[in-house]
Image (spheres, helix red, strand yellow):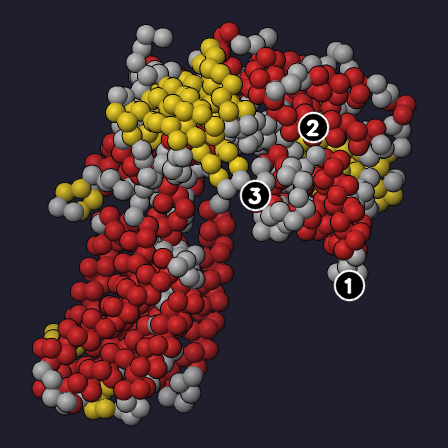
Amino acid sequence: MAEQAVLRMTGIKKIFPGVVALDGVDFRLLPGEIHALMGENGAGKSTLIKVLTGVYGIDGGEIHLGDAPVLFTGPLQAQQAGISTVYQEVNLCPNLSVAENIFIGREPRRFGRIQWSEMRRRAHGLLARLDLDIDVSAQLDSFSLAIQQMVAIARAIDIQARVLILDEPTSSLDASEVDQLFAVMRRLRDDGVAILFVSHFLDQVYEIADRMTVLRNGGLIGEFRTAELPQMQLVAKMIGKELEALEKIEEQTKDVTVAERRTPILEARELGRTGAIAPFNLTIHQGEVVGLAGLLGSGRTELARLLFGADRPDHGELLVDGKAAAIKAPRDAMANGIAFSSENRRTEGIIGELTVRENIILALQAARGWTRPIPRRRQDELVDKYIKALQIRPADPERQVRDLSGGNQQKVLLARWLIVEPRLLIIDEPTRGIDVGAKAEIQRLVAQLADGGMAVLFVSAELEEVLRLSHKIEVLRDRRLVEELENGDDVDADRIMQTIASGATS
Amino acid sequence: MIDVTTPPAPQKNRPFLGGRRVYRPNAKHVPVLATLALLIVMYSIGVYNYDGFSDTQVLLNVFVDNAFLLVVAVGMTFVILTGGIDLSVGAVIALTTTVAATLLAAGWPAGVVLPLVLLIGTVLGLGMGAVIHFFKVEPFIATLAGMFLARGLSLLIDRNSIPITNDFWTQMAQKRFRFGEGIFISLNVVIALIVVLIAALVLAWNRFGRNVYAIGGNADSALLMGLPVGRTRIAVYTLSGFCASLGGVLYSFYTSSGYSLHGQGLELDAIAAVVIGGVLLTGGSGYVLGTVLGVLVLGLIQTIIAFQGDLNSWWTRIVVGVLLFAFIVLQRLVTRKAK
């Protein structure tokens, strides 16, 4: 490429105690491009970003910004040099106004006095550049996550950013919000900003990125033009082996016939909760994978929480094994053999300070009651079994869970619920924010569990995944269950998208 | 062909409408307005039930009797806005008064003693702030240690009450600003109001003030946004230490004495005033004006109990306790609704 790179990293090496996190990685970023950084969890993406923004020092290699060699000692320095980062979690202050969030730390001042009206005017202008017309004096947390994300970007680009790093910016946005974000990214690219984009959603990367750099195990695999690298090849490069696994799953699940799953476990009759989800009917049979599809905020999680007793229904009834069951709290659901793995693995699931073993044992211990501790030998056996079965890495039961990658945390969470041997496992977004390899493993696991007779309610924003795994797909739209589809050859993503877009088709 | 990532999603209702604003009482203002309403109700009850309660001086005396608390509570407001707490302020008052009284009794000039005692609290605050920031100690623990330290020091200096007879001190204590027949405020009130004014301006118009709010909102974000989190946090405890020792000086004007048992439990009064004034204990939300109202509420309760005459003064505590509960619940409700 003839153009001069705005950022060049050569031979970057970063060593953590016992691990080489980055080993001779080269990376370059051209002005006016969107460049995706690809790789599985643990491949070194976040380390590379942290090295670039000065959060970590480097043990070898050079970073050039423009022509000058640079070495940042902190995010503030990087920002001042024109490298701004927007993180997955919105790192703003929810209690301050939009305008203030954009300008705090560099407010326009006169005689030391902050000029609020000037600040609001400039914030408005800046957001207009992103096609956003909102009340900039309103408090940040009165807006949706997507808007907050935009505000974070507005803050980043006002620091005269030459390089904008977007680390998983889309993971909590729904599809239309992602579109909005992409429009903003394209506009910035056209303005000459170099954008480094990290995402686990391959479709999104293919939609937006001009080029990509692939990392694996801390090493550089290569730099590619998006148009020249088919998706399957990219995945192969990321995980280092062909992805036959994914195709196998497909064969596995589809051959279970309707006849084999006739015993209903859970039945919801006109179950509903005002403001959360309209009354719905749903029957889940033994050995069945039921997929819940719908947009973010369409009531997927709300439905799942009702079935688990995490929220109280104010309408209808719930039957377990054909008998009315009083499921008033998660405890009751667990007593009936229902387990729920939450979508917020950080806040509602994993306890980071506890070890892998302690996290896995938690639900089983709770089910037995605290007066009957599980003997340590039994614990070790069980934990070892599930670490092996789920291929949790590192395979060290005494490691603190917060040291594990997202995918492995999710597996620990799954193990926690599998160990109590539920009859119905509700999993909400088990594959969000984790890499392709781990995704495939978790999907394979779900298929296996269903084969073994467990019923699974599978909630996911990714239609492909729902389609691949489910026997039956429940489509939600605007907090209403609009259609039930028996998964078969005639059902594909388009068909579901139509339902989501327009309501029931028949 | 419809792409999975770009569904033809129904247009959702987003707060995209900019420009014109429809008036809704800002959730942030609700606690302050509630305190104001409470204050008006209490005052009305007083006026309705007791003769002479409507005298202007009754209201002004609330200020006169609580000026030191107001100053301390202003410092506490900054601390609580960052999500911290300062338990040392009561003990710092004791230390300030004791040191001042001892030195003055030993013949030191007031011009030396005054800056010195102000420095004591400031330095102690700086120390606690540094410990909190550099060693990542919980503010509760660090300031608890500061409290024991200050109280212990003052007990070490003198266990008895020491009268202050210094001319300057006496003059300051007796200085009155009169507005008419029998209507006056003391110098303490003027000082306290100046402190309030400066604090309000700093919080609303100054970078330091806004950083305080940002840290209270989300300290991690504030750090990633490149704000001077450590510096601000240390400054806040230093400021609270200064306010506490200034409060101590006002207290020594007010009582003309230094005593190592002065200001016992005063830190809790200050915290109560701040919370009743609508400052969120978790930080990030609240106003100095609220704190002023909170102090007035505490003062008015005492006044009402004094007018009633046959009530034990401990009733003040009971009423304050009930109010605290009520306001914390109110804050919960308001913040939950905002979510």
Foreground: disc 1 or disc 3: 3
Residue type at mark 2: give it: Glu
Q: Position of residue A401 (x, y in %)?
A: 61, 45
Q: Is residue A458 above or below residue B11?
A: below
Residue type at mark 3: give it: Asp
Q: Position of residue B215 (x, y in %)?
A: 36, 50
Q: CA distance from mark 1 to mark 3?
A: 30 Å
Q: Nearer the viewer, residue A70 or B241?
A: A70
Q: Are marks 1 and 3 on the same chain?
A: yes
Q: Is residue A211 above or below residue A40?
A: above
Is A383 displayed left or right of B126 in the figure?
A: right
* Image mark count: 3
Q: CA distance from mark 2 to mark 3?
A: 20 Å
Q: Earlier in the sequence, mark 2 or mark 1?
A: 1
- Label 3 Cα crowd, 10 Å radius (few <14 / some 14-19 / many 20+): some
- The residue identified by callout 1 is A371
- Label 1 Cα crowd, 10 Å radius (few <14 / some 14-19 / many 20+): few
Q: Is residue A349 above or below residue B325?
A: above
- The residue identified by callout 2 is A441
Q: Residue at x 15, y 76 (%)?
A: B114
Q: Is residue B85 visible?
A: yes
Q: Chain of mark 1?
A: A
- Label 2 Cα crowd, 10 Å radius (few <14 / some 14-19 / many 20+): some
Q: Position of residue A137 (x, y in %)?
A: 32, 39
Q: Residue at x 41, y 18 (%)?
A: A34
- The residue identified by callout 3 is A403
Q: Nearer the viewer, residue A419 or B300?
A: A419
